Amino acid sequence: MLFSKIFGKKKYSRKASWFLKIFAGAGILFLHIPILFIFLYAFTTEEKSYQFPPPDFTFKWFPIAFERNDIWQAIQLSVEVATFSTLIALILGTLAAAAVHKTKFFGREIISFAVILPIALPGIITGISLRSAFSLFDIPFSFYTIVIAHATFCIVTVYNNVLARFRRTSMTQVEASMDLGANSFTTFRYIILPNIATALLAGGMLAFALSFDEVIVTTFAAGQQTTLPIWMLTELIRPRQRPVTNVVAVFIVLITFIPIIGAYYLTRGTDDVMGGGK
Amino acid sequence: MTSIAQKISNFLFFRNNLFLILLLLPPVLWLGIIYFGSLFSLLLQSFFYIDNYTGLIVKEISLQSYRDLFTATNFDIILRTFLMALSVTIASAAIGFPIAYFMAHYASDRAKPWLYLGIMLPLWSSYLVRVYAWKLLLAKEGVISWVLDKIHMTWALDLLLDSPVLGGPSLSISYYGTFLVFLYIWLPFMIMPIQAALERIPRTFIEASHDLGGTPDKTFWKVIFPLAFPGVVAGSIFTFSLTLGDYIIPGIIGPSAIFIGQAVYSHQGTAGNVPLAAAFSIVPIFIMCIYLWVAKRLGAFNAI
């Protein structure tokens, strides 16, 4: 049968069949090769088409992209939005995680469901709901409408990371601190915060990455503002200078890899779930 | 003298419920008002309708927008999106399962973190950049055509593109392209939960099955697969739901025929028919509710 070919021969063995090894390797390559081509195309001399192989290579697109004002403005807006939404998500996500962890209250399941929903439902649902609510109440689109939208779907990454950390933090330290006469604030400052610090950092980094990259909800929550992904989308639909887009794409890949790898190392070897699946 | 902080602390310490409410209030207010309030306003607007003569939105409860969903054009959009979501989900489960199985059961301790990062980086890294990368690969003069030309397989691509309905002038303007990009973008969402489910199966179960005379096939189908199935369902929820709502991928790669997401986008924007856009966006929610209900009935959540 096919499955004996894929999953091993006569006996259950600790070694994978060749077929499975090659399949898994090819799968991982499939996930990475397209990104490598972005790097290659950032150096092409060909401006108009997606011709492969590139006729020649050049570094000139990097300084050209560097001098484009619109790109810098988009980056600045994206960083500002991501910073504010991450801060809000950090506060709300930690509070929700603390409440869910602390007690088994009525509606606890509903809270964890409500936190995950904005990311589990397609982004377009979150986007158009917020937009219809904004227009219903005549709220003009601004920097803040983008932040509100982003913070809503960023809560989940902080919530997941902090809740997982709470679950494996022993509460005896907290009790000891209280027994020794510290009040809740002192206990929070000296016991709880150091314990959850790396989970907060990891959750915050992922929230930042999530916000920095988000495009679907942003198109609905933004008016005339251009975040970096919106800039990218415009260039994809109506390209102006293709190689410049390639350079920006390389930049985005490098920038988003940093927080992801950082969050990975901060939560490594623990049961902390990074995103619970974006 | 006790400080104010001490007083507040003491006050809260003996009132556990009050403290809990203080913790819960901000996130509940935020999600309740902003998110669920918005969802409700969307639902409400889907019952409004647009006046065909004035082009204005009539704020009266009516099922007009929902009736409009069943016109031939709109129903085609829904069917097309549904079939795409279904095929993407099946394909990513078929491809994702062996990868997850290898990661969970065979990868050495040294290789495991690398494989994990290998799935994690694409999952979290830029969605748009990865879609863009596929434009480079699928274009008529792009990488895939070039490779096929070098190995003298262009005829196979031509044969594929000649097929009715699914084909097109090039991979980037056919349903094959849309399917491939969806598969690529959502595949990590399938691998991660399956891997987590497989990781939780104790090795002793497999050894017990073997000791009791189970062949690898039998062990796989009677022990491993049923225990990993909740992971497949969890992954499929993501792949299915995300394909139903996406409007960027079919907008950039594929034929000009539109998907639900694009219909929502154009009706709320250029067409100015917000009620119809709202009705359209209720469709993925509705399909997902049925999906989750069926998944629950199948007992898929019991093992989580």
Image: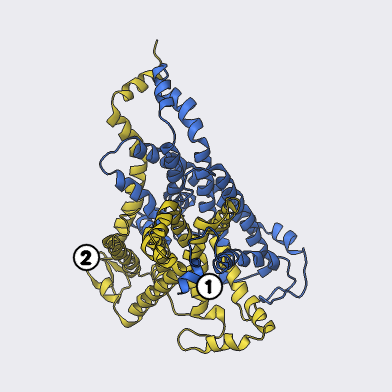
Chain colours: A blue, B yellow
Q: Position of residue A13 (x, y in %)?
A: 51, 60
Label 1: how many residues lie within 10 Å, few (<14), some (14-19) or many (20+)? many
Q: Please tell me the numbered disc located at residue B252.
A: 1
Tell me the residue that label 2 is attached to: B61
Q: Which chain does the numbered disc 1 sit on? A: B
Image-quadrant location for residue B80 = bottom left
Residue at the spot 46% in from the left edge and 64% down from the top edge: B97
Q: Give me the chain letter of mark 2.
A: B
In the figure, B153 relative to B77: above or below? below
Apparent side of residue A115 relative to residue A12 in the rendered image (left or right): left
- Among the two numbered marks 2 and 1 on one chain, the one whose residue lies closer to the N terminus: 2
Asked if residue A188 can be seen in this view, the reply is yes
Residue B154: where, in percent of width, then height? 62, 86
Measuring from the top left, give residue B283's x and y in whole percent. Answer: 32, 68
The three-letter code of the residue at mark 1 reads Ile
- The image quarter containing residue B239 is bottom left
- Judged from the image, the secondary structure of the residue bearing numbered disc 1 is helix
